[in-house]
Amino acid sequence: MVSQEWRKASVKQIKGVGEKTAALFHKLHIDTVGDLIAHYPRTYVRYPVAKAPGGAAAGETAAVSGRITKAPVVRRSGNMAVTISWVGAADDGIELVWFRMPYIRNNLQPGNSYVFYGKVLWKNGRKVMEQPVIYSREQYDGIAQTFLPVYALTGGISNNQISKAVRAALSDERLFADVLPGEIRDKYGLSEYNYAIRQIHFPDDMDTLIEARKRLVFDEFFFFILSMQYQKEKRVRDKNEFVFADDDFVETLKKGLSFRLTKAQEAALSDIRRDMRGPCVMQRLIQGDVGSGKTILAFLAMADAAHNGCQSAIMAPTEVLARQHRDTFEKLCEQLGLKIPVVLLTGALTARQKRMAYEALQLYPNAMIVGTHALIQEKAVYDNLALVITDEQHRFGVRQREVFAEKGSHPHILVMSATPIPRTLAIIVYGDMDISVVDEVPEKRLPVRNCVVDTRYRPKAYDFIEKEVRLGHQAYVICPLVEETENLDLENVTDYVKMLRGIFPEEIQLGLLHGQMKPDQKNKVMEAYQKNEVQVLVSTTVVEVGVNVPNATVMMIENAERFGLAQLHQLRGRVGRGDAQSYCIMVNGSVAETAKKRLEILNASNDGFAIASEDLKLRGPGDFFGIRQSGELQFALGDIYQDAAVLAQASGAVGELLAEDGDLLRQEHKGLRAYMENFMEARISQMSL
Ligand code: ADP
Ligand code: MG
């Protein structure tokens, strides 16, 4: 059967997936077969060659082959059944332990040989394997050295469950229609879809994996670019209906600032001013590294609008950022003697506060409006909205920019982003926008001091943080995970904050922050941190964007090797925002030479653009596991830096396709169009750039 029906089917229709598993899948945003097969492995491990129990070392993930020398017994520990057995010689074997699986006893015959796969631990003076997977010798020989997919998991679901479900979903009688036109496949040497999807989950070898990945990355880019351009090719820029005076208002404001704009800020500002007085509305991307000073540009543009009797609005991705901007803008208005109403509109306002904000939108035709997604909700009705700005655009859905613009009548659009996308790529990705680059940071700022260390350095790092806190400063500690997972030896914030509690003296307040917390909980923690009621914030990467706590001087990043360099750079950008010297401690949890080399790039440079291009040079083809450079561009597999060549090809292919059949009306493109409409639009609206 070749069709798209199976793609749309609920995961419950997959053999072996019941209500319970489906509910767990739902937590991973997997509801349909299509979602499941697009849940690509985050990395792969190879099953090792099996060894004798005596040869496996504690700490190692191993396959041990040997005879069961003690009949399995089931004991009770509280409510839990614990099955215990032993493989190998009494003095040189490994204890085997399974929790809550009493039936295991029936699967093991004393005296018979098996292969046990799992992590070897050292407990109570002996080697122990907990929850090992059991294979017969023949079974294991069949899989030794093959790739094992490792999936992103959520509480309660195992890697094995996902892998089994994917295997069942891809069973042979089911085939997906390959919607990519054959000519494109041939021209760019891409493998067939069904082959690629099987190989990405269960690769035969490295070559087939690379081939499969190329096809799927091409698809991601191709359909993304196509969706962005399809039917928009003919879109013309709207006429500028706003009349802004050609006076020296902004020049005068600049003189009242407490600092001088950098040359790069000046250039961007002059682009903005000119655009807003041009024949067509502005559509401009301001691309500037963290700390390059984009907020002041937004403020001056908004003041310009207010001066000309118009409203303007800036949308930030988080409540914290929106409030931060509101405070900044109010201070600037006061400092500059401007009587411009600043209106805050966010989701966390009370009903009454919201109503007042809506009223203010009607009351003040020259208001500066600052908010979150609440700005684009139906109830927010503007009067005379001439300028819309999205800050940290990469945090918003690509369609939200458009919804925002529709709140006005052809307003000017300004988009601000810190993602260091190389210009050639930005042109593809941001298609219809003009670009100003703010490639300079204010000169007087002290560059952040960096160090890359291994885990032995931790005690020193904690001492150092304590010292900084005693000087009145604050610190961030970043871990990659929220809580412990079974597959990975990575630090998680939940355990880390408990561990730190035992290390720091009581008077140092610790905060915990991660993306799974409720918005108002997050706000509370962030506010406490902003007020220095919390001195050390243990967080996942949720603080990556926009947060401005100039009093924070230490950024400590655990498992730094797991983060993309751009992401590390953003994290580091959270410190060095005030006058004091700041520090970034990157803890490398890996012994790999490549990890060290990559982190050295960050160590050596504080320039986001330089980092992105250096990182690219370091990587060879096939070096694509585990680390994602452009965390913001949420492609499942593709990475706009590393896969720049594929991106260019996909862009070329879209160009050729649309040149031939701009509305995709031809019979042979029917499948393609249906795929776009059924599957891409939803995904695109969720994607952010
Ligand atoms: P980002 O580009 O990351 O959004 P911000 O706009 O938050 O950066 O600016 C970071 C800090 O630098 C702010 O405290 C801001 O007031 C300050 N700043 C902006 N421009 C300048 C400048 N030209 N000289 C000195 N400080 C500046
Ligand atoms: Mg900013």
Image (tube, rainbow, N blue to C red):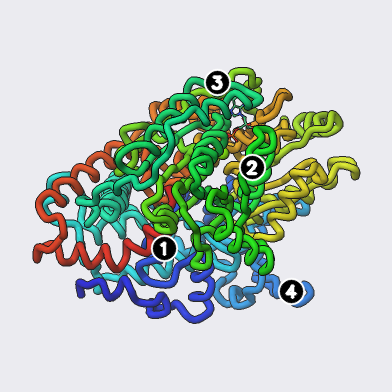
Say which residue label 2 marks.
339
Q: Amino acid at mark 4?
A: Arg
Residues tagged 4 and 3 counted as in contact (Cβ below 8 A): no
Q: Amino acid at mark 2?
A: Lys
| Residue 627 position in % (x across, y down) | 48, 41
Residues tagged 2 and 3 counted as in contact (Cβ below 8 A): no
Question: How far apart are labels 1 and 2 at the CA level?
Answer: 77 Å
Judged from the image, the quadrant occupied by ligand 2 is top right
Residue 55 sits above or below residue 174 on the image: above
Question: How far apart are labels 2 and 3 at the CA level?
Answer: 45 Å
Mark 4 or 3 closer to N-term?
Answer: 4
Mark number, residue 75: 4
Quadrant in the picture for residue 173 = bottom left
| Residue 372 position in % (x across, y down) | 56, 55
Mark 1 or 2 closer to N-term?
Answer: 1
Q: Amino acid at mark 1?
A: Gln
Quadrant in the picture for residue 614 = top left
